[in-house]
């Protein structure tokens, strides 16, 4: 079958991977000059299979006033004259209840575990280099109350197959000595040994390289700006792009935050809104000062990952419009956080800042699967977990296109669920 994938972020590249492995003739359309140059470029690098609990939970409600008022809060809301933003916020608030949050966690864990097994097979089968490490993850809590609730979540997640351990402050430092500077503000931590990390951009480039082989290599059309889906008799016949029309038997839409705009003229509404985040990449100049395991500072919502000789720091979630522009004040805040946490990791002279737009849905679940158009499939809305979930999401889409039962149940992921 001829399949066109729209978008070469990690979602589109991973979907192309599963489709190519199924033997389809795959074309990927991307407006940029290469793969993963937007949100999938310099994200936090965490393959966070067991930390999938959504932002929308009852514990978030009391934190909303400080987000609105404090300029240095890790989450920031700037109201826009944009009905989509308000609709998103109302749906987010409606999802902030325990039942929905538990349900979302269960669904995301299933998808994430499937991704983990696909990632483990991929790296076992192929020599690919993207600074991948299976080094585990420490989530560090500053408040005893937050640590207690993390322990409760750990108990709940144990029943769903997660293996995690609660550590005292001393055990935390013993496991990751580079956390020494943070020691006075550690109430406890949760360690998950089965978490991985890697560079998302390099990962996409490596999959692109692998897909150049075989009897039917993937056809990459970079610089192709998708303008419109051409619909005839309830099916997509072609996509109109800046480089002409491209016809196919099936289409997979993986356009990240651009998805709603393209779908709106077809009256397909996807609740995806950009949640802007920042990252820094710094060279590690003092080996003992940089963490080896991935670390999350839960209170400040900042994550740290070792990617080869560099440290990747990521954080902030700003619901503040649709433009991926660096705000110097937010960059400074993130540098200050990272320097305070790991002062010796780097000399902090060569800091590469970046920002990207997470394609967030109010509940935190991606939208996967069929649409009212028979041959159009969605792989969007991966929010803060796109790198983690991409392989499983792409696999599920390939299952559906092949007419197989999807490897992970689609409940809660389908459009309109
Ligand atoms: C600061 C930050 C930290 C993060 N940390 C992590 C992490 O540690 N772990 C994790 O799992 N996830 C993380 N994420 C989330 C993850 O990066 C995203 O979920 C993921 O990159 C989304 O991938 P995507 O392919 O859906 O979107 P994108 O990467 O945005 O890809 C969409 C592609 O579609 C293309 N496109 C859009 N419109 C058109 C058009 N009209 N024509 C042609 N092409 C078009 C774009 O150019 C782009 O390449 C983080 C995100 C941010 C911002």
Image (cartoon, grey):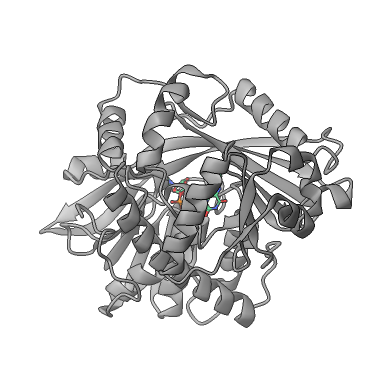
Please indicate whether residue 258 sits to the left or right of residue 215 in the image. Answer: left
Quadrant position of the C terminus in the picture: bottom left
Q: Residue at x 54, y 58 (%)?
A: 48
Residue 221 seen by the camera? no
Q: Residue at x 47, y 77 (%)?
A: 216
Q: Residue at x 29, y 36 (%)?
A: 93
Residue 240 seen by the camera? yes
Location of residue 154 in the rendering, given as x and y in whole percent from the top left corner: 49, 60
Location of residue 167 in the rendering, given as x and y in whole percent from the top left corner: 65, 57
Please indicate whether residue 120 sits to the left or right of residue 284 in the image. Answer: left
Location of residue 360 in the rendering, given as x and y in whole percent from the top left corner: 39, 43
Location of residue 387 in the rendering, given as x and y in whole percent from the top left corner: 52, 57
Viewer-proximal residue, 204 or 276? 276
Q: Against 50, is 339 above or below?
A: above
Quadrant position of the N terminus in the picture: bottom left
Viewer-proximal residue, 174 or 90? 174
Q: Against 358, is 112 above or below?
A: below
Please indicate whether residue 201 sits to the left or right of residue 386 in the image. Answer: right
Quarter of the image for residue 349 reads: top right
Quarter of the image for residue 343 reads: top right
Q: Against 254, is 85 above or below?
A: above
The number of numbered discs placed on residues in the rendered structure image is: 0
């Amino acid at each position: 079958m001829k399949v066109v994938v729209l978008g070469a972020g990690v979602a589109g590249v991973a979907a192309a991977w599963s489709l190519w492995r199924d033997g389809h003739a795959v074309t990927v359309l991307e407006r940029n000059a290469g793969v993963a140059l937007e949100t999938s470029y310099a994200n936090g690098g965490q393959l966070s299979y067991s930390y999938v609990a959504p932002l929308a939970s009852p514990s978030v409600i009391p934190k909303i006033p400080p987000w609105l008022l404090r300029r240095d809060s890790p989450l920031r809301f700037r109201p826009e004259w944009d009905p989509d933003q308000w609709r998103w916020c109302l749906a987010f608030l409606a999802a902030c209840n325990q039942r929905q949050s538990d349900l979302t966690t269960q669904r995301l864990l299933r998808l994430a575990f499937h991704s983990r097994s696909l990632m483990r097979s991929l790296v076992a089968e192929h020599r690919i280099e993207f600074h991948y490490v299976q080094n585990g993850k420490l989530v560090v809590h500053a408040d005893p109350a937050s640590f207690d609730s993390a322990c409760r979540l750990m108990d709940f997640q144990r029943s769903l197959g997660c293996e995690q351990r609660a550590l005292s402050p001393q055990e935390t430092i013993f496991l990751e000595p580079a956390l020494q500077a943070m020691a006075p503000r550690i109430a406890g931590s949760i360690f998950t040994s089965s978490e991985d990390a890697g560079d998302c951009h390099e990962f996409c480039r490596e999959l692109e390289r692998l897909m150049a082989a075989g009897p039917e290599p993937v056809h990459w059309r970079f610089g192709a700006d998708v303008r419109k889906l051409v619909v005839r008799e309830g099916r997509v016949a072609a996509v109109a792009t800046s480089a002409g029309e491209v016809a196919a038997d099936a289409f997979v839409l993986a356009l990240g935050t651009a998805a709603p705009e393209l779908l709106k003229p077809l009256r397909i509404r996807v609740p995806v809104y950009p949640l802007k985040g920042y990252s820094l990449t710094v060279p590690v100049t003092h080996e003992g000062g940089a963490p080896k395991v991935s670390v999350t500072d839960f209170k400040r919502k900042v994550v740290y990952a070792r990617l080869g000789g560099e440290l990747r720091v990521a954080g902030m979630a700003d619901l503040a419009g649709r433009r991926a522009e660096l705000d110097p004040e937010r960059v400074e805040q993130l540098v200050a956080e990272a320097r305070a946490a790991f002062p010796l990791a780097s000399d902090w002279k060569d800091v590469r800042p970046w920002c990207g737009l997470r394609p967030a849905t109010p509940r935190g679940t991606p939208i996967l699967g069929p649409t009212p158009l028979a041959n159009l499939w969605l792989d969007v809305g991966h929010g803060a977990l796109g790198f983690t979930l991409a392989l499983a999401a792409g696999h599920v889409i390939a299952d559906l296109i092949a007419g197989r039962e999807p490897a992970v149940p689609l409940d809660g992921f389908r459009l309109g669920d």
